[in-house]
Image: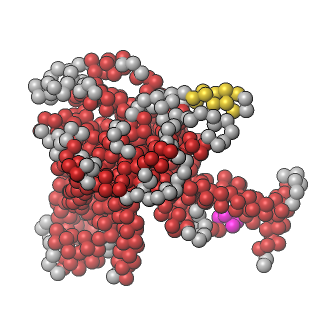
Amino acid sequence: MSTVRRAVGRRRPPTLAARENRAGLAFVSPTVAVVAAVVLLPVVWTAVLAFQDARLADIQETDLLSGWTLENFRRVFAAPGFWPSLWTTLFYAVGGTAGSILLGLAAALALRRPFRGRGLLRGAMLLPYVAPVVAVAFVWEVALSPQYGVVNEWGARLPGWDAPVPFLSSRSHGVSVLGAQFEVPLALLTVVAFEVWRYFPFAFLFLLARLQAVPRELEEAATVDGAGPAQRLRYVLLPQLMPVIALLAVLRFIMTFNKFDDVYLLTGGGAGTDVVAVRVYDFLTARYDVGAAAAQALVLAAVLMLLLGLYFGFFADRAEDEA
Amino acid sequence: MSARPAAARAGGTAGDAVGGRGGGRARGRSGERTVSVLRRTAIAFFAAVTVLPFLYMLLLSVKPVEQLLADPGGLWPREATWSTYRDVLLPASSGGQGFLRMLGNSALVSLAAVALALLAAVPGAYAVARLRFFGRRRVGVLFLALYLFPATLLAVPLFVIFARLGLQGSLGGLAVVYVAQTVPVSVHMLRNYFATVPRGVEEAAALDGCSRPQTVCRVVLPLAAPSLAATGLYVFVIAWNEFLFALLFLVAEPGKWTVSLGLQQLAGGVEVPKTVLMAGSVVLTVPVVVLFLAAERLLAEGLTSGADRG
């Protein structure tokens, strides 16, 4: 039976599968070519540049395959503030990721059931995410300004808010809570808050879609069994949402870890918000030190890979434990 | 009718089980009330944090700057002025900030990026969605993996290449960069949609004598119009909002600034009043938001009209 079919298939020249294979390769090659030219090639070149002594001025003379050196990495690691900047980046990425997912979860839970104006609010909630970063960063900058910002003007009416607070230019700010004094990295917290505000709609979209796919019977059954709202959230909804939350955590962490615009626009990387992406930019434009910029970008990518490796390793272990 | 007593009984036993801390049912009801209050508070909170910053932007953009400096807390302008918009839009030769020209630059770059990205993404997406070829799955994974490549890794070599080719300060070069940033996701978006186009339609076209490219152009693409629009919108928004590469490539040439870059460059100085720049922010934000809202409706219509066509 099968031999007959195979024989028939072979007799028709060229087979349907072979033709489809050829068509597939023909269709996919332009896209792959574009991607190779504008994405893969530059990334490979970054790796090469990181090991060469390259300044923008003499880049014309350097050829691709000579002058290998580790000097760039030495410069990157020895530059003042390298390690603090890595910690700042980590704090920024973890804070931004966790905050935006938590806020997105709260929003998705709140907008789950229909109410009047829900469609409108749903649309409005996406505004921070789709609006141009330069425009919203400028609005935050003006609103938070100690001279003419609305936040300080209104905040001054609250007890304990005596002097205007320089949200974006204060490396550490004394705060007293119930008589205890704390120093908080105010500018860093502010850029994290901005990140959370801008990206919680992203988490909200994903989580709302998943929430609406949870079968009603699950929650009804839990209610019948006497579960309160908190228990339903903890034991019914969260397990359903966990895969989406894990995916969001990875996506948002990668994006926030490499973030440049938001921080650069709000603080220029000053006041303790010197994330690594801003350092890459500084190496590149302030000193035209292409080699060091490439090395710094590569170090950032390597740290990210390492963290993702740890994350996936951890989850693989947990999955095995549960199995 | 019958569910209620059952719930009460179940709630009662649960309450007893934890040591008889009050009736389970009463506790449940107060819990529901707390949730309802929490939900309302949350809705009000989210409405406030998303809408108020944009309202602030709008209000400041029509406020005379003296009012802002005299009374930063008073949001409602006592008299609205439109001169801020005139100031920000007019070319520098007429005493303005030249945003009209920057809007043109932004539109040019973004539309070019949309056209190029779709041109580059459609064949690949179709192949990955529909055709069984050697390496299909690997190519699909490759496109997704590229999405995760950080822009900082691209920035350095592109900066160097453009400096070398003399493309620094060229809007065309910038459009190419935006294609690089959006093709992976575009392939992904389109491929999901192409996979839903019924095979039968394509087979019918093939029987009628259409070649594969003809089938794609005449049958698949018209059916996939909503997803083309969605993907195009995605590329447009990314390109319109982008800042890092515009800064790297165009900063030395004010005549070619995009709106994002222009706004950032002017915001750094003290010469231009903040209210005028707020008008600039509105001008920068409105096209994206309008497109986004319009597209939401277009997408819904496109999907339903596709449904009854079979």
Q: Is residue B48 above or below residue B73?
A: below
Q: Percent position (x, y) of residue B251?
A: 24, 39
Tell me which segment is drawn in magenta: A218-222
* B122 over B146 or under it: above or below: below
Q: Is residue A219 magenta?
A: yes
Q: Quadrant of residue B131?
A: bottom left
The reply to whether residue A54 is in sight is yes
B184 over B159 or under it: above or below: below
Foreground residue among B287 and B155: B287
What secondary structure characterizes most of the magenta part? helix
Q: Residue at x 47, y 44 (%)?
A: B69
Q: Does the image show residue A312?
A: no
Observer-nearest of A157 and A282: A157
Q: Residue B219: percent from the left, percent from the top?
A: 23, 75
Residue B15 percent coordinates (x, y): 84, 57
What residue is rendered at 36% in x and 33% in y?
Answer: A278
Indicate whether A57 appears above or below B122.
above
Residue appearing at x 75%, y 62% in the figure: B33
| In magenta segment, residue B136 | no
Q: Quadrant of residue B265?
A: top left
Count all numbered tags in the image, as a single digit. Answer: 0
